[in-house]
Amino acid sequence: MHSIWPLRSFLFVPAHRNTWVSKAIRSHPDAVVLDLEDSVPEDQQAIARQHLAQEIQELTDHGVAPFVRIHSWGQQSAEEIAAIVHPGLAGVFLPKASSPAEVAGLHDLLSYHEGRCGLQHGAISIMPLPETAEGLQRAELLARASTRVRGIVGTVSGPVSADVADAFGFRATLGGVEQYYMNSKLVLDSRAGGAAFPIAGVFGVPLDDLRAVESLLLRARNFGYTGSPVMHPSHVALANAVYSPTAEEYQYFEGLLQAFSEAEAQGLGAVRYRGAMIDYAMLPRARQVVAEYCRRQSQPAERP
């Protein structure tokens, strides 16, 4: 089965706003997160759940991966998971994830409802959001708690901060130096726990300040995140561009692989390429970039 990962852009859409899904699709995100949590008023929760099946189907029909952000783990979780599992659902965002037991409990509920709906076991991913001090400290354990976990969800915040900043205790700035430890820790914890696709939401700057949004996306990418949840359709194209290999990168690494192949044919395990010494340690990254570039080129063109 072809993997949808890595996913570059995740656009949040309040699940009770079902007419917004078609608008979200037009911005060409890799994934849409249908939100049941912070963006849905309490009196609209039932309506939001009723819309999910149709919204998931619409996204799937257009080649966009559907995710759902549920509420934090609690007494309502069993009822909520029963309402969100439909054919095509790609994954679940678990907010305020604090303990491995919460991830394991979600894993078990998803397994039951996959069977009930006739879905392949393990098809639905889990994306924990450690928005508490306990969760931030235990991020590797969250990643290890289920084979469904594809990545820990971090955040790269501008000056307007929220749950994660409060939990960690930093005061967010646009420069972000106060977040460097957390940003690096969550990437390493995710990968050490077997979840190869950590992602980082970019928030805390004015929606129309695209230069600031792009700077946060670039920072997230350089820390090692593989994609970003974003809050506005105008941010999707930025995320897709930032997380896509460029033609220049493809040419560089394709040339590197060719040069190394020729060296191997001569019995060599290292070769000088564009002034640098290349050996086997450089090959996995080169193959990854070339494969991802070719995968993106084979997909329909994205409008800016």
Image (cartoon, helix red, strand yellow):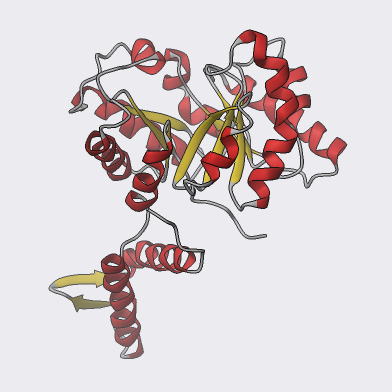
Quadrant in the picture for residue 247: bottom left
Residue 14 visible in the current orientation: yes
Name which residue lies at 27% across and 14% down. 170
Percent position (x, y) of residue 242? 32, 49
Q: Residue at x 39, y 37 (%)?
A: 187
In this figure, what is the number of numbered marks?
0
Whether residue 108 appears in this view of the structure is no
Q: Quadrant of residue 232?
A: top left
Is residue 277 or residue 176 the one in the foreground? 176
Q: Is residue 67 above or below residue 165?
A: below
Q: In this view of the protein, which residue sits in the foreground, 277 or 10?
A: 10
Which of 286/217 is in front?
Answer: 217
- Please identify the residue farthest to the left as the structure is shown: 275
Image x and y of residue 215, in percent: 23, 38
Q: Is residue 51 left or right of residue 220?
A: right
Against 189, residue 47 (above or below) is: above
Q: Nearer the viewer, residue 292 or 257?
A: 292
Q: Is residue 59 above or below residue 299?
A: above
Placement of 105 over or under 27, stated as above or below: above
Identify the image quadrant of the N terminus.
bottom right
Residue 74 place in picture, x, y as percent: 66, 11
Query: In the shown orientation, is residue 84 left or right of residue 275?
Result: right
**Which residue shows up at 32% across the image and 87% down it?**
262
272 left or right, relative to 297:
left
Residue 44 at x, y percent in the picture: 66, 14
The residue positioned 32% from the left and 26% from the top of the image is 182
